[in-house]
Image (spheres, helix red, strand yellow):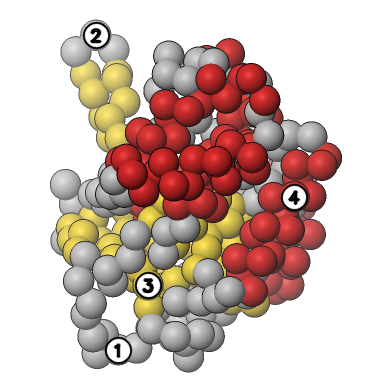
Amino acid sequence: MEGTVSTRHAPVASSDGPIGGPSVAGQAPLEAPPHGAPAISLRNVGFCYSVRRGIFGRSRKWALRDISFELFHGETLGIMGRNGVGKSTLLRLLAGLTEPDRGELVNHGCSCSLLALQAGFVLYLTGRENVFLSGMTLGLSKAQMRDRLEDIRAFADLGEAFDQPVRTYSTGMLARLGFSIAFQVSPDVLLIDEVLGVGDENFRKKSATALRDKIGQDKTAVVVSHSPASILELCDRAVLVDQGVSVFVGGTRECIKEYQRLLNKAAKTG
């Protein structure tokens, strides 16, 4: 491993202020907190995985190389970037499903729920059984999940498929189930990975409305999306990730402009 590695789950005071501010192609300067205290802090976070080279050789590939920002209580933070730049890996780090290989990630006592297609689902279990399993992974008891079961079933609107193995589900059905569980469990931080555009039009509208309602209640959320309209509508700030680096942290409109510049540059260079 390279550099200092730290993943902590206790409040800390930073001597040099919050991490993350408007910046392009460099370390983000500091900015005043847009909401309350930090929920999750990342400083120079990197993550790598092993790649096979030939029969016996292996090498490391850095999915994330230098990510720095803070997520504040009560804000919705957008994550933008081209395919394959590490956005989903970043959400898994925020959720605590994996740990960084370098840098520092501090969770300030928050529970997190990752909403991604098939995230945490056991494919041979039914939708109903996966509801209870998801609750257990988030520290809820069977009785607590039983109290939420009817609301989850009703919001997902899967009909008889709710009691069928999720391996039989379409992508849209998986999104319905995952979204419904995440909202009824109501974690401190909701992590949403490219699912708002999945499923039929009615469910997309219903899920977007539900997310807006949560945001109106000062819910803390991170939203990964390729849709500038979704980022503008839902998010207070945004992070642009490119080649494993947080190259911009700041306002949503500015972030979208930088994202478009990256896309235009990539199109010109082929």
Viewer-nearest of labels 4 and 2?
4
Task: State the CA–CA distance, disc 3 to disc 1.
Answer: 17 Å
Residue, disc 3: 39
Three-letter code, disc 2: Ile
> Image point 30% across, 89% down: which residue?
16
Task: State the CA–CA distance, disc 4 to disc 2.
Answer: 50 Å
Question: Callout 4: helix, strand or loop?
Answer: helix
Residue, disc 2: 55
Viewer-nearest of labels 1 and 4?
4
Task: State the CA–CA distance, disc 4 to disc 3.
Answer: 27 Å
Q: Is residue 120 above or below residue 183?
A: above
Viewer-nearest of labels 4 and 3?
4
- Contact, mark 4 vs mark 3 (Cβ under 8 Å): no
Q: Which mark is residue 16?
A: 1
Please rate how many residues cluster around mark 4, counting C-alpha atoms within 10 Å: few if below 14, some from 14 to 19, many from 20: few
Does residue 113 appear to the left or right of 178 in the view shown? left
